[in-house]
Image: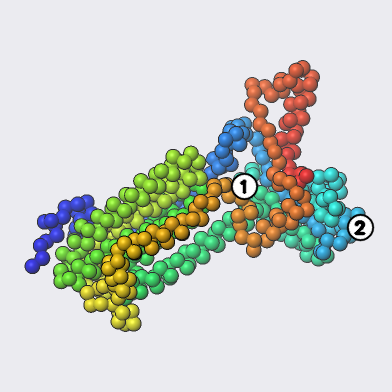
Amino acid sequence: MATHPRTRHSNIAARAGAFSAAHWKRAAFGWLLFAAVAVIVGMAAGSKSLTNADMASGETAKAERLLAAAGFERPAAESVLIQSRGGRLTVNDPRFGLAIGAVVGELRSQTAVTDIQNPLERPASQISGDARSALVQFNVKGKQDDAPDKIQPVLDAVARAQAAQPAFRIEEFGFASAGRAIDKTLSKDFERAEFLSLPITLVILILAFGALVAASLPVVLAFSAVLAAIGLNALLSHVIPAADATQSVILLIGMAVGVDYSLFYLRREREERARGLDAASALQRAAATSGQAVLISGGTVLIAMAGMLLAGHKIFTSMAIGTMVVVFMAMVGSLTVLPALLHKLGDRVETGKVPLVNRLRRPAGESTFWTAILKPVLRHPAVAASLSSGALLLAAVPVLGLHTKLPSFTDLPHSLAIVRTLERVQTAFPGSQTPAEMVVKAPNVRRLGTGKRSASSSAARSRRAFYTSRSTYS
């Protein structure tokens, strides 16, 4: 008769599993309630994103903080590129002038648009060297961060100008339009990841367990951990602002570790049942062994990710916090909710067996596939270790070429229209697409200079240059 595991194991994971099994309703429904509340409260509170000063570094970050503290309203600059199809016409052609007029007219009808600059009035900076491309530049009213939410009517107006001038290519690019495109792309990618990751993970787990219920438990727990982590991270972002990529990191890491931890636990419980232990004893032994492995593995990941907090950049800090939150949620779910559900389900965890998959499995729960791989590995451990080490080193070679950089529009897929527009703008107007800004802080900037009169005019010019700052593409 097997020794009762509780008499031999008294670690934290074993005690958590025993408590959850004894109070399965409290563990299971408490977890679901916690995840639902975290999501609802997180959505209600919203997420606070990193500012330009948070994402910048060095002198740039210092300048951004000075500008933010001074309360300058920096509008979002936009540009509309106008080119004839095939590049045959120049701005001297009357038809080109009509196309420019159509764009300017549409922009003037938009309440969110201000400071429209006609390229015919500023040929030095808004007409390309070959005179075959022109830029109509303008600003979006209000705060720069709010501009992406107000740009869609302007994009529609530019689209109407394009429809009225089919002989020309009329495209918009700028902070607001690119920001909106990025937001839409990230949202679609996140939805696609949610849609694809769940069924693909479920199929893999069905192949691993051979039963629908057993395969569904890790997926449900992992996804609920991801939802809870997203809600908690939204709340934490009001203390430590979140990077745009953090939510995607939470989804990817959360599904990976959530399924992995549940897989450890569930697999061990089934193996103990196959060895002849009753349901309660098998569950407690799985809690004391695989549960402890989950606890140690999760703690190791948390410590490793905490190292990113020392990187000195808030993007890495945001990703580290998001990862730590979702890993902790996956640990909690695996150590509490999973044993509660396994206790309640009992033998019903084998419901929904897949006959074809089960034929490939051994009665004791061993996998034919992995047994075939492990036999030669155990027979020749030195050779296996050498080959696996060489394969890992070969796979790590690309790391030597990695370098850090801030995300930019050029990192987006070239299939996006906004990226192709940017490339055409860069080709027609080589140079930087953002203006250089010099920030000066003093008790009274109007008194800077060698003389009172020259100082006043210099300060006025500096102030005007800041407020009318825009991309010149020269």
Location of mark 2 (residue) = 94
Near mark 1 (Cα within 10 A), the count class, few <14, some 14-19 or many ≥20, is some
Q: Is residue 465 above or below residue 115?
A: above
Residue 257 falls left or right of residue 55: left
Amino acid type at mark 1? Asp
Image quadrant holding the N terminus, namely bottom left
Measured from the top left, where is residue 75 in percent x and y? 68, 43
Secondary structure under tag 1 reads: helix
Residue drawn at x 58%, y 59% is 185
Secondary structure under tag 2 reads: helix
Residue 86 visible from this viewpoint: yes
Q: Is residue 209 above or below residue 328?
A: below
Residue 48 visible from this viewpoint: no
For the image, the number of numbered tags is 2
Residue drawn at x 38%, y 59% is 389
Mark linked to residue 83: none
Image quadrant holding the C terminus, namely top right
Residue 372 falls left or right of residue 90: left
Comparing labels 1 and 2, the label whose residue is closer to the camera? 2
Could you give the CA–CA distance between mark 1 and mark 2, rounded to whole angstroms? Answer: 37 Å
Location of mark 1 (residue) = 146
Callout 1–callout 2 Cβ contact below 8 Å: no
Amino acid type at mark 2? Pro
Measured from the top left, where is residue 277 in percent x and y? 15, 69
